[in-house]
Image (cartoon, rainbow, N blue to C red):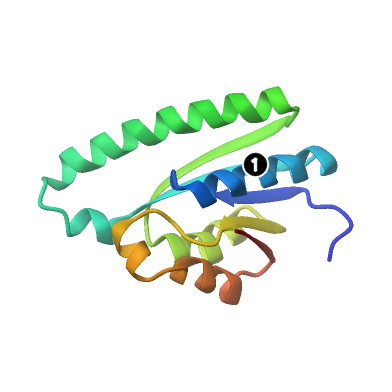
Amino acid sequence: MLDTYKRILVAIDGSEKSEKAFNEAIEIAKRNDATVFLAWIINDVELTTSAYAFSRLLKDEQQSIEEDMDEKIKIAEQAGVKSIERIVEIGSPKEMIAMDLSKEHEIDLIVIGSTGKGAIAQALVGSTTAFVVNHAPCNVMVIR
């Protein structure tokens, strides 16, 4: 384990477990004077299987995410985190978190909830987290 973490990626999706992961990441960032990368990946599979028009659903989802991100950034700043970066992407959450974002941003710790909130994710309980644990190039902290 590293003595300090300087680049922490926290995966959020509005679920209870991701809220706990966010809170844990903030505490770790404060102790380590680290940058927090707040990542919300819109699952493209869930969007394409929806009965609603893709563009309408995406617009609604993005607006909700932006509001949630603004709130989380405010909380993190009030807690004393000095550097926060916002990431909102569309794609496969497990692949983007484990491989793309962690490498692109040189992440040294990923903090993720044990389960997510999406309907498909609930059917495959913990599949994203399991993938991230097994494929990430850095340490992963799973929050229950």
- Where is residue 135 drawn, in percent x and y? 57, 74
User: Left of 6 or right of it: where is 137?
Assistant: left
Image quadrant of residue 2? bottom right
* 110 is higher (above) or lower (below) than 32: below
Badge 1 marks a residue whose secondary structure is helix
When the figure is inspected, residue 31 is found, relative to residue 76, above or below; the finding is below
- How far from the left and from the top, in percent, is residue 14? 44, 43
Q: Which residue is denoted by mark 1 in the rendering?
A: 23
Residue type of the residue flagged with mark 1 = Asn
Name the quadrant containing residue 81: top right
Count of labels shown?
1
Q: Position of residue 7 (x, y in %)?
A: 71, 49
From this viewpoint, which residue is outermost toward the bottom?
134
Q: Residue at x 51, y 73 (%)?
A: 131
Outermost right residue: 3
* 136 left or right of 16 in image: right
| Residue at 29 percent of width and 58 percent of height | 119
Query: Which residue is depicted at the point 70% across and 33% down?
Result: 83
Quadrant assignment for the N terminus: bottom right
- Residue under the point 36% across and 63% down: 122
**Residue 84 location, x and y as percent?**
64, 35
Q: Residues within 10 Å of mark 1 (few under 14, many from 20)?
A: some
> Is 103 placed left or right of 138 in the picture?
left
